[in-house]
Amino acid sequence: MEGVRSWSVSGLLVIVVQVVVWAEVSGHYTDEWAVKVKGGEESVIQDVATRHQLDVVGKILDDVYLLRRRRKGSIVQRSVMSPFSTQQQQQHHQQQQQQPSTTSNHHQQQHDSLLNDPSVLWADRQVVKSRINREITTHHLTTSFTDLGSLRAKRDVTEQQTIENDQAPCHTNINFNDPKWPKMWYLNRGGLRDLNVESAWQEGVTGKGVVVTILDDGLEKDHPDLVRNYDPQASYDMNSDDPDPTPHYDFTDINRHGTRSAGVIAADYNNTICGVGVAYDSSIGGIRMLDGDVTDAVEAKSLSYNSQHIDIYVAAWGPDDNGKTVDGPGPLTTKAFKDGVSNGRGGKGSIFLSGSGNGGRDNDNCNCDGYANSMWTLSIASTKADGTVPWFSEACSSIIATTYSSSSTLDEFSIITITIHHSCTSYHTGNGASVNLAAGICALALQVNPDLTWRDLQHIVVRTARPETLQANDWQVNGAGHQVSHWYGFGLMDAYGMVELSRNWTSVPSQHSCEITAFPTNASESSQSFAVFELYVVECQQVNFVEHVQVEMSLDVDRRGVIEIHLTSPSGTKSTLLTQRHKDASRSGFTSWPFLTLHMWGERPQGKWILEIRSKQGYNPGLSVRRCKLIIYGTESDPHPPSSLLNIADDSDQTFDYENHSGNGNIVNSTNTIDYIGNETDTNKTSPLIDLQIKLEEQSVMIHELLQQHQTSSYNRSEIASILRDQTKLLEAQHSCNPVADNTTNCRTTTMSRLRKPVDKYTADSILQKFPMMAYSVGHKDIFQEAVYLLYGKDFEIKTDFSKRMIFHCELCNKDMNAVEALENHCRSGTHQKNKDKNERESRGTSFRSTGSTNFPRDSLQYRLHHSTISPIGLQMVEEYSKGNGPSYYKCNLCGAHGKMDHMYYHVIGKKHIEKYIKSSFMLESRVLTAKERDHLREELVRAEGVDVGVIRKITSVDLFPRKWELECRVVPKQHIKNEPRSPSPSGSCSGNMKTSRTPSPPHISPPRSSEPHQQGARPKARPKSPSSPTVSFRNRSPPPPPPCPPLSQVLQRISLATKDTREMSTQKYDIEELMILFNFIIKTHCMPDSELRTGEDAQAVIKMLFKISHCLYHITKECQMNPSTPNAEQEILASQRLHLEKIMGHVKKRMETLWKARYRSSK
């Protein structure tokens, strides 16, 4: 490829050099150049074009122009009515390229002359790129039809059939008159089996005001199902340089994908035509750019077209999905992406959507597609109607979420949309259909909150995606609690969840990045077949919460397809950046290719990152790593704002006067609210989010939501009643009422008492397997819980998440399962069995040293280790098993190692096993050891092994004794509360200090690390008992089991005594720890669906108390912050708390407003 001149002004040189090596383009050079000149003025570019006999075609980006070589008697222009399809054009160009050209030397001279022009800063000759859309056509399929003509005839006959006999698979109360609406299963199946779009529609969210454009092969703008929503300002024809995006028609109808994509997003509703778009009130446009030569300039112009008007760009296309291509955006397209997210939509950032691709049949990996692999795009994967992986789907670590598609054009469950010639089709397939559905859902979210930035939308997708219905064998939970998969990203997109979370979303903090470079000399292990790098992150330049992680890789290899790359974070999350691709025989390797992973989203970056580069087993590809760089993007503070799935701001400009409210429903029109002590507080103020281990504001937001009973449609209610009666035999015909249909108190009490009778195992299995999950939300928790106890034991319980979905929780393993199948698999897993055995050991009071060597046979591994000179650690993690009549084999459940006695002997006494055992023992989330075993191990390490605290900290990269704020549901406050307010301390410091020596501190405050290392072999000195430093001991101090919860009346009385008069709060001192315990105690014990709070009056009383507590905490933290004797570090913490509590009070007041409105309306 021809050289590129240095462009120091714009910084594109690095991008160009990278892209030159990335792109393995089989196309040819064009007669066009992208040029940047000094000053960027049009007069200068005109002079340059004249000197080099070029024509100025136009501006590509703000400071880059496109020049075209001038021909005698004509100007180079592609015909709109080209007789070739895109594939035929590429073949024609390749044939021309193979023929000797008499002007090739002239082209080279012209290029060199342009580069040497003193007015030119940078120039790049354009190359035709291979770009295909993400649609599955008949030539992709392997079917029993030998004649494609008969296949097409069969499809056409099917499409022409009337839908009068269609069996509507939907369960919906929305009745559109569009004929295909009953068969749009991905929108109207109900439950967890669709994209949850109907719930958003019912709240009036239809995409109105959001502009979407389709970058594809054209758009049939006069289609009757699009004409109402067509937006000419979002449309252009890049191939023929005119404003009409109408596709080129030919006998193959190949240019149909753009029109089909637009129909999925914005097809009109209730017009008796075809189906309905996901965002059927959004504005839709099309940019025709795939029906001709696609160059870097064409892509850049398309992705940056009218960026202040267009909100969402849908690019359901990419490089060849053949399992051997590595290609991505050129320098101009990369700059278009960067400019789009920085300046598009008035600075909020354009939204770009791409697809994971259709190369699954060729074992392709979408991280080799530079568009799906971009941090600036939402990369969308596909799933079938049954939640399985389609045959065409690609897996990679850059996928963020998933929507539906189908496996073939003959699939019963495929995507319905419009097509060219004013027609309709029921067979829209491939990954492109999934991208279109995702674009429609994003349009719904932008309607309710147009101020969302491009990163806000990514956070919302991550937080609302549902993994429970998607089947894959690689699901894992990352260090931040997100479930993630290489096939599906974070799960199935949830339209209603995104809409509701977007309503009150606070923009995430600014993004920062840090880089760690590794060279071949840094590799801990390396050869010509593998390399392992350990990268340590100590301080990450204002990145404390991870978003995107890139590994920029440069390596040489004899066969690129045998290489696979893995990255493991400090939290233990392992992400596969590249899988083996058997068709990729390239010797080019990679040069500065940025592999992207989202699997560490929300984790902390500090610690050891492990990068593994390995080749196919038994193959030596001559691997040579030239350079790799780890780039971590994220935020300094927690980017997660309070989550709410309810619209709490129906009338944001109307608030109630709580002081003067007398039940008459008078509304005060004001932009400010009145708090309980008569002060005006501006509710429009925003404050930075605080990193809390307990989300107090999220719990506050949940109060009203959890008190409300889940509402289901009449169809669902009748279905629940039928299944209760027929399948579980728990509702009998003699019942005088149905608790599902009749929700009165008497009916509910009577029926639930009858339902609490014991059930047999068959009935329990029927409940869990056949009973719909929605029934749990309407009051049948006891039935489910009894069934779970009977089948799986007392270690499992049922609870709900923010979306009121039922999940199973294992108390032993502290793990949530969202399906019965996952519950069964976990119950049979080795992890659960290990924890169950550990619980039994703990209940018996045994220690890991209590079993001596005399209890083991002399020929066992345990006996040999106990009689060795090295004291074994983690011996109870080794299991013995036999293979037939041969010698015994051993397996380490901690490390996964297995083998014969000699091999496992050296494994147990080896460094890897000991270090991993120490880590798992000291980590707070460890479930390996009992409390006594962990306490015993700590003592023995310090006494016998000579390992001091500093060494163990270095090994584990975590604090040994962090104080964690954990309040269980049944925690009871202190036994005594002083009626008298606390007097100020003699020193003048705040006596309501949040740090104590023997009780847990609030989650903001982490214990200080010791700066003085202990001497080798000595017991570490205990820290002094002071408010700023807790007592450190190697003994586990487990509190005794708490007594049962007190009644609500007693709780309210205790709070009243603790807070007294809030008007005098600024001059009094209170125990902040106790107030916070009370705060969490009320939420967790009296605000759950099965609690005693069922009436609006009780809910109102509790919310008032919560407001008093938060208000009390607010004044205490403010007073402590203003105290001159308070250290600066504590002042910063208290200031953060105060801002955080402002948010809590705001949310609680909104809940009160909602309840007042509900009572007022019911009274009227």
Image (cartoon, helix red, strand yellow):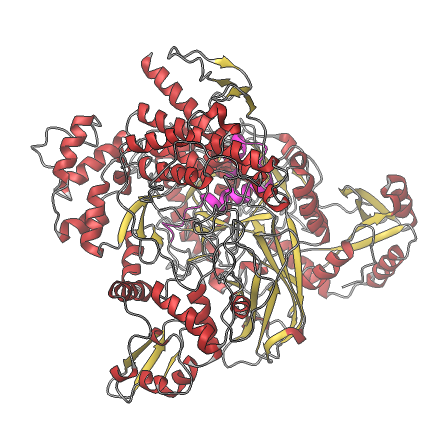
Q: Is residue 1158 above or below residue 804?
A: above
Q: Is residue 1008 left or right of residue 715?
A: right
Q: Is residue 154 left or right of residue 1122?
A: left
Identify the image quadrant of residue 537.
bottom right
Any part of residue 867 in sight: yes
Q: Which residues are magenta?
A: 442-470
Residue placed at 18% from the left, 49% from the top?
Answer: 766
Q: Is residue 808 above or below residue 395?
A: above
- Residue 839 spot, x, y in % from top left: 28, 62
- Residue 5 spot, x, y in % from top left: 83, 58
Q: Compare residues 850 and 156 and report the one nearer the observer.
A: 850
Identify the residue at the far left of this view.
734
What secondary structure predominates along the stretch shown in magenta?
A: helix
Identify the image quadrant of residue 524.
bottom right
- Residue 327 spot, x, y in % from top left: 63, 59
Any part of residue 24 in sight: no
Looking at the rendering, in which quadrant would you find the C terminus? top left
Residue placed at 55% from the left, 26% from the top?
Answer: 683
- Residue 238 spot, x, y in % from top left: 68, 42
Q: Compare residues 1161 and 137 and report the one nearer the observer.
A: 1161
The verdict on residue 931 being magenta is no
Tally of marks: 0
Q: Is residue 1048 left or right of residue 406?
A: left
Q: Compare residues 755 and 1008 and report the one nearer the observer.
A: 1008
Q: Is residue 232 above or below residue 92?
A: above
Looking at the rendering, in which quadrant would you find the N terminus? bottom right
